[in-house]
Amino acid sequence: MPAGAIAGALWRFVLGYTFRLNTASPISKEPVDPMFGKTVLLVFALFLASVAPGQAPAEESIARVLSLVHAQTAQDVQEIGLVIRAVSEIRQLAVDTERKSLAVRGTTGQIALAEWLSKELDQPPRQQTAGQQGQRTGSHEYRLGGGGEDLVRVFHLAHPAGPRELQEIATVVRSTADIRWLFTYNAAGTITVRGTAAKLALAEWLIKELDQPTGGQPSTRQGQQPLFREYMVESGGDDVVRVFYLTSVRTPQRLQEIGAQVRTTARARRLFTYIPLNAIAMRGTSAEISLADRGRISAGALCPRNCRRVKPTASKSGL
């Protein structure tokens, strides 16, 4: 019998039973038990909830086994599993380090994203030559349905010297761009990010700024090193991201000291140092950025004489 017919019959029964509730039964002349009536109403309500018109049925659960080809160690397999579990929001995921495989169960959308991520992350270890690195540098994108934080990107970095540098870049990007889903995979030198288009645009800008050869800094079109680069965030307010390049700093300790002083001067909540480039990344208002700039100068982090103060055209995004 169709669900609609069953619901109609139950509805007529409940209406009739409710009308007689707490009245004398024509047969037994005894009052009807109120608790039994409430039970009937509860069962009927649950039934209606399960067959409500327009309600989408629960999506079918699908199982897959994802085999990894290039993961070399148990840690590699576990790191890939962690990224897939978190970004795809899959609760049922089992890691088999011996067979280098992942058993996953989830909805069609979750499994599709998990398969895409496994292919993006399961890459050969980072190569050492610049030519081979250049072939893998960049990002690949996966778009989810439903809006909101519906974009996933895997950034393949070319220049981080090791896991520590990769983690430093990830910390700067996660905190500066307010990204909830951000994970690294050390063996392939990747950063996986999920968020809105605006947040991923800022993440991409930051990664490009920081993914430079150790000891090097980005150059302007004129070939000179900039004192800073800036990203204007269009969020309906005064929101700026700036990366300062302190070319005269010689030691990591000195960079940390300058960062602490600038943080205090500008009262900056989001300020981070990146030692390989002698860089300070900060997000704040224009006034806070100006205070940070003055604090940097007062701390003695001056640009050499042959370095002109250059501010490239600001990047823009809605965040």
Image: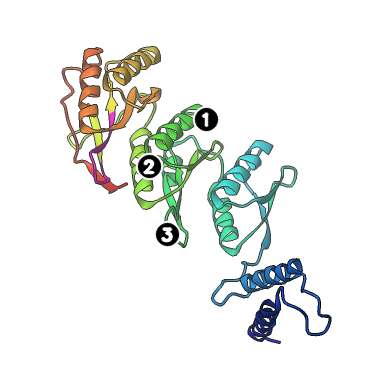
Q: Secondary structure at mark 2?
A: helix
Q: Secondary structure at mark 1?
A: helix
The kind of residue tagged 2 is Ala
**Mark 3 = which residue?**
147
Q: Nearer the viewer, residue 15 or 124?
A: 15
- Mark 1 near mark 3, Cβ–Cβ under 8 Å? no
Q: Is residue 190 above or below residue 118?
A: above
| Comes first in the chain, label 1 or label 3 | 3
Report the residue at 47% width, 59% height from top.
144
Q: Secondary structure at mark 3?
A: loop
Report the residue at 66% width, 69% height from top.
46
Pinpoint residue 81: horizontal percent, then vertical percent. Answer: 63, 45
**Does the magenta portion include 61?**
no
The kind of residue tagged 1 is Pro
| Comes first in the chain, label 2 or label 1 | 1
**Mark 2 = which residue?**
203
Residue 224 seen in render: no
Pinpoint residue 249: horizontal percent, then vertical percent. Answer: 31, 15
Start-end of magenta stretch: 233-243
**Mark 1 = which residue?**
163
The quarter of the rendered structure image containing the N terminus is: bottom right
The kind of residue tagged 3 is Gly
Pinpoint residue 49: horizontal percent, then vertical percent. Answer: 62, 70
Q: Count neighbours of disc 2 (C-alpha within 10 A) and say few if under 14, some if 14 to 19, many if 20 or more.
A: many
Marks 2/1: CA–CA distance: 19 Å
